[in-house]
Amino acid sequence: MASIAGGGLATALTLGSVTVSATSGSVTGSTTVNVQSAVLSSITVRPVNKKIAPLTSQQFQAIGTYTDGSTHNVTAQVSWTSSNTAVATIARRGRAKALTPGSTTITATLGSISGSSTLHVSNATIVSVTVTPSGRTIAQGTRLTFTATGHFSDHTTQVITSDCTWTSDNHAVATVGAGGTAKAIAAGTANISATFTGVSGTAPLNVSTATLSSISVTPASAVLAPTTSANCVATGTYSDGTTQVITNIVTWTSSAPNVASVSNAGTVTAQSPGNATIAAQLGPLSANCAIVVDGSTLTSIQVSPQTASIPQQTALAFVATGTFADGNTQDLTTSVLWTTSPASVATISNQPGTTGEATGLEPGTATIKALFGGQLGTATLTVTSAAATSLRVSPAATNLEQGGFTRFTALAEFSDGTTMDVTSSVTWTSSDASVAVVTPKGVATSTRSGMTTVTATMNDLSGTAVLAVY
């Protein structure tokens, strides 16, 4: 059920009860320790109060908060329902399809716990479709994913990539799949089109005559502990001097899958102590990554920052670093079990891509915990009652060449005088998506010449920046 170290630190192993005893000479004391699994306490459905146009779709997520303060993505585990299926239906994995104008409540249920959000369907009609990127050149055999943005009669924009029908006007040059991912076949130009309810947008795709001359894999080597993982990236260098990430088109193999396995996406998972060579191959060319799976005992986990303070409703990412008996260290952020105590002050995520990100809920002090391999690392997070008083976007104005990209940062000023980077917490929009589109991380990609206003919104606050594309 549990093990206990010489210093009295008990580590839970399996569910159940165990008696822990301490003896000094002829005197013995004991207590019962119950090992229980964390229980789901609430479900949050995201996004909240979303408004979309008829015949478009919206992906919802169900985020479960547990009694140990951790949060997990339970989108695939919950049962999804729509209160008004005439307005919108919702599929098993949380993708809603808007049908007619009106409102419906989207609910996610797991056991006796439910969470909900309201989806509004407008009466807007499609005006135009923009396909990005435009005019990109890629090598034969590689892929490029396009995005379709719909411009509607109520002056709103939506990403409608999954709602469009995708076509290529030259299959000998490039083909395109349902999700907007094009595959380069041979040198030439193909126009990639996205059509939504009879309205289309098009972007040219150029396929060069360049051939693959070499492949490199990063990292070139890595030391992992059993059950941890690392992501390998394959980059191709072509005969015209250009480079392109080809991680998803190479064939990944491991020389010793029992030591380290590798997925089709290049994710390496350590299995048992030993050495393995991870290879990325495309045609006759290949490159390797040397993996050492270290069976040395994990001696400690350090969580950083050790102490931190954030306003409520903002987030902060923590990092867990493991130190092993042989002196090696490893970033264990994506491998540890993150929890908080008390969960009412802050929650922490174990979701892919956001692992170790704590969100402050209410004023107080919480202990951030990272558990792995019988070791526990902790940090202290103070959540203040400070409220955001203003929001600004940096840079306030910038110029960008057509086809390029730039990154914006959202900075919030709070009532306690502090300033915090809230780039990942705000909602990003572009006033003219035909000029530039902005990702949830504040990265703007230009599509044609013109000007657009980039806006960051958080609660009732907003900040703007001007982007000129030439």
Image (tube, helix red, strand yellow):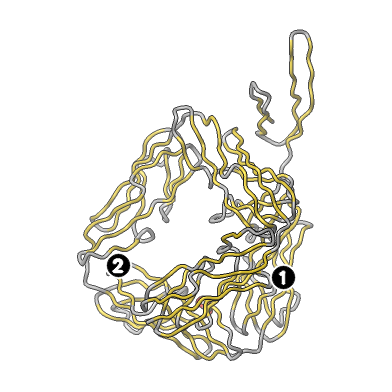
319 left or right of 220 in image:
right
Q: Quarter of the image containing the C terminus?
A: bottom left
- State whether residue 296 is above or below residue 240: above
Question: Which residue is rendered at x = 43% and y = 45% of the image?
Answer: 261
* Residue 346 drawn at (x, y percent): 70, 51
| Front residue of 73 and 386 | 386
Crowding near the residue tagged with mark 2, few <14, some 14–19, many ≥20 C-alpha atoms within 10 Å: some
Marker disc for residue 8: none
Q: What residue would you read off at disc 2? A: 141
Side (left or right) of 117 relative to 333: right
- Taking the spot 67% from the left edge, 49% from the top edge, the residue there is 70
User: What's under tag 1, amino acid-wise?
Assistant: Ser
Tell us which disc is closer to us: 1 or 2. Answer: 1
Residue 117 numbered tag:
1
Q: Residue furthest front?
A: 417
Circle 2 SS class: loop
Q: Quadrant of residue 423?
A: bottom right
> Distance of mark 1 from mark 2, alpha carbons?
42 Å
The residue under the point 53% across, 47% down is 334
In the rendered image of this protein, does residue 449 appear above or below residue 175? below
Query: Residue 373 appears at what percent x and percent y?
Result: 57, 34
- Image marks 1 and 2: residues in contact by CB distance under 8 Å: no
